[in-house]
Structure formats: structure tokens, C-alpha cells
């Protein structure tokens, strides 16, 4: 499965905006869209204590009962997932996006990501249910080698974006990739650095402007990278934040650690994590 947008749905409040953002990206990139529902392998049994059965043969009885309960739970979760997929497909169909592939996967997160192959963009919600998609954001960003768009609980077509630039080689590569992406076509782009090099920031702005992207550069201050980024986004009407998931600066250390969840909690805007 290559060059597609994958929308990860789990029935949480983020499910509808995940579909809407995925449809937005699919139209601009002019590539197919697939909906994915994940059934993760659960190491916790549905019933942990059936010791009310006493007797020599109770162990065999309990084992059989557990097998029946686990089988029924799996069947119900699979049926629930199919309902979620069909409901999402209907939402997209009503929005004029009729050609959608429905996928349901079962297994560990790394197995599922490997099985999906070389996809173009993965879209998932910031808040999820107990299902793995939406609740294992850092793991997905680490394991998935392609851009990941993490969205809030409501959809707003992006019109003004902010790219968090750190001057690293990886950040410059991501900047060059953005000049080729249809996602930025017609949008205003704020390129920002937190306590960075003003000259490097201006050079980055010129790269975007040369590609006919309306770009503004802003050198931000603040002791916290997250606070500085979120404040600038709020003050300037930003509705999409782009940043590298891995780099070689304070941004790299910031986004690989547990502070990723802090950033997700602080900003109400969608985050496009570039790899």
C-alpha cells in the first residue's frame, strides 16, 4: 500500500475531525484515502478471577470459560470497529469523498505500521479511547517513518501555518520538502525559531519565498519552547503547526521526551510531525 493518506479512527470524539483532516490532505495531495481501525493485542484477560468454581476439574473449566469470554469480546470489538469504519465512510461520502478504502488490523503497533507499508501521511486524533490509535502518540511518531498529522476535536481548514525551525540539517531538509508540498499551496506560513539565529531564520524565509510561499519570519523568546510556540500560534491565528519529530537541537530533545504530551495538551491546533 503506497502513497496514500491513512486516517486512524477509533470512535473517540476526534474521529470525525480525523476523517475531515484526512480528506483535506487527500484532496490537496491528490492521493487515495484509507480508514484504519486497530484492534490491539490485549495482554489483560477479560475475566481475571473465576475462582468461584472449586474442585479438581475447576482449572479446565476456568480455561474453557476464559476462552469463550475472550472470543466473544474479540468478536464484539471487531463488530464495533466495522461500525465505526462504515460510519466514517458515510461521513466522507456525504462530504463528496466517495472512494475510501476500509482497513481493520489486529496486532501490535509495530506489526501494524510495518504491514501498512510506505504511506504518505498518517492522521490520528490527539485524544483517543482505550484503543491504541490516539493513545500511543509518541510510539507512533517514533515507529512511523512518515509524516504524522495529530488533530484536535474539531476541524478547521488550515489557512495559516507555523513551521518550528531550529536551523539543523534535518530542519532544512524538512523546509525544502515543504516547498514541494501541495499542502502549503495558497497558505500563509510563519517560520519561527525560539532563541535562535536571526540570520538562519531569514535564510529559511527566503527558501519559502523563492518557492512562492507567503512566508513571515519570527524570532521568539521564552524559557519554554512549548509556551513560546503555543503563544505565537494563539496570537497570530495559526491553525496548523509543523515541526520535525527528530532533529539535533533543543527541539529534538523536547519532542522525543515526555514533553510531547505537554505540547499536545497545551495547543488546540493540529500538529504535523515531519520525519
Image (spheres, rainbow, N blue to C red):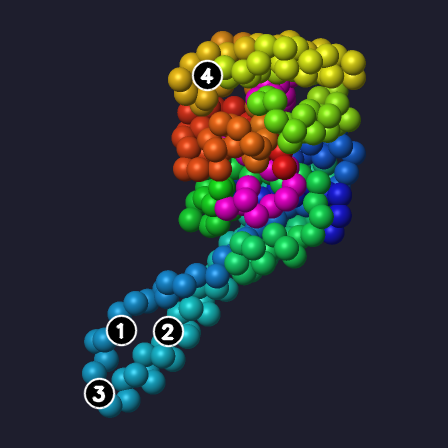
Residue 115 on image: x %, y %: 65, 57
Frontmost residue, 251 versus 190: 251
Q: Is residue 162 magenta?
A: yes
Distance Cα–Cα, label 1 vs label 4 = 54 Å
Residue 163 on image: x %, y %: 60, 21
Query: Which circle's residue, 1 or 3, is located before the other in the chain?
Result: 1
At horizontal 21% and vertical 76% (from top left) the residue drawn is 52
Give the image quarter of residue 172.
Answer: top right
At horizontal 27% and vertical 73% (from top left) the residue drawn is 50
Residue, disc 1: 50
Q: Which of marks 4 and 2 is in front?
A: 4
Distance Cα–Cα, label 4 vs label 2 = 52 Å
Residue 46 appears in the rendering? yes
Q: Is mark 4 on a helix, strand or loop?
A: helix
Give the image quarter of residue 197.
Answer: top right
At horizontal 34% and vertical 85% (from top left) the residue drawn is 60
Query: Which circle's residue, 1 or 2, is located before the other in the chain?
Result: 1
Identify the magenta region. Answer: 139-164
Residue 38 on image: x %, y %: 55, 53
Residue 66's mark?
2
Residue 89 appears in the rendering? no
Q: Nearer the viewer, mark 1 or mark 4?
A: 4
Cβ–Cβ under 8 Å for marks 2 and 3: no
Label 4: how many residues lie within 10 Å, few (<14), some (14-19) or many (20+)?
some
Residue 228's mark?
4
Q: Which residue lies furthest to the bottom in this view?
A: 56
Distance Cα–Cα, label 1 vs label 2 = 9 Å
Frontmost residue, 60 versus 209: 209
Amino acid at each position: 500500500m503506497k502513497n496514500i493518506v491513512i486516517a486512524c479512527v477509533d470512535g473517540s470524539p476526534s474521529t470525525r475531525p480525523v476523517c475531515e483532516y484526512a480528506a483535506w490532505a487527500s484532496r490537496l495531495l491528490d492521493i487515495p484515502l484509507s480508514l484504519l481501525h486497530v484492534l490491539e493485542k490485549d495482554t489483560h484477560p477479560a475475566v481475571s478471577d473465576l475462582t468461584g468454581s472449586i474442585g479438581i476439574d475447576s482449572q479446565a473449566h476456568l480455561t474453557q470459560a476464559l476462552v469463550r469470554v475472550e472470543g466473544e469480546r474479540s468478536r464484539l470489538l471487531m463488530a464495533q470497529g466495522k461500525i465505526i469504519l462504515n460510519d466514517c465512510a458515510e461521513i466522507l461520502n456525504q462530504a463528496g469523498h466517495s472512494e475510501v478504502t476500509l482497513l481493520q488490523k489486529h496486532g501490535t503497533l509495530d506489526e501494524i505500521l510495518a504491514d501498512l507499508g510506505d504511506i504518505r501521511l498518517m492522521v490520528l486524533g490527539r485524544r483517543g479511547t482505550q484503543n491504541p490509535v490516539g493513545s500511543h502518540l509518541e510510539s507512533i511518531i517514533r515507529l512511523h517513518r512518515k509524516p504524522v498529522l495529530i488533530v484536535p476535536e474539531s476541524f478547521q481548514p488550515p489557512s495559516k501555518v507555523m513551521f518550528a525551525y531550529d536551523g539543523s540539517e534535518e530542519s532544512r531538509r524538512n523546509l525544502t520538502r515543504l516547498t514541494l508540498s501541495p499542502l502549503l499551496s495558497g497558505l500563509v506560513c510563519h517560520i519561527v525559531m525560539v532563541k535562535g539565529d536571526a540570520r538562519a531564520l531569514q535564510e529559511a524565509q527566503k527558501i519559502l519565498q523563492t518557492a512562492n510561499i507567503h512566508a513571515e519570519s519570527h524570532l521568539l523568546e521564552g524559557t519554554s519552547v512549548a509556551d513560546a510556540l503555543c503563544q505565537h500560534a494563539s496570537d497570530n491565528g495559526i491553525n496548523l503547526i509543523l515541526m520535525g519529530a527528530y532533529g539535533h537541537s533543543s527541539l529534538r530533545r523536547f519532542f522525543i521526551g515526555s514533553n510531547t504530551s505537554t505540547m499536545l495538551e497545551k495547543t488546540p491546533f493540529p500538529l504535523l510531525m515531519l520525519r
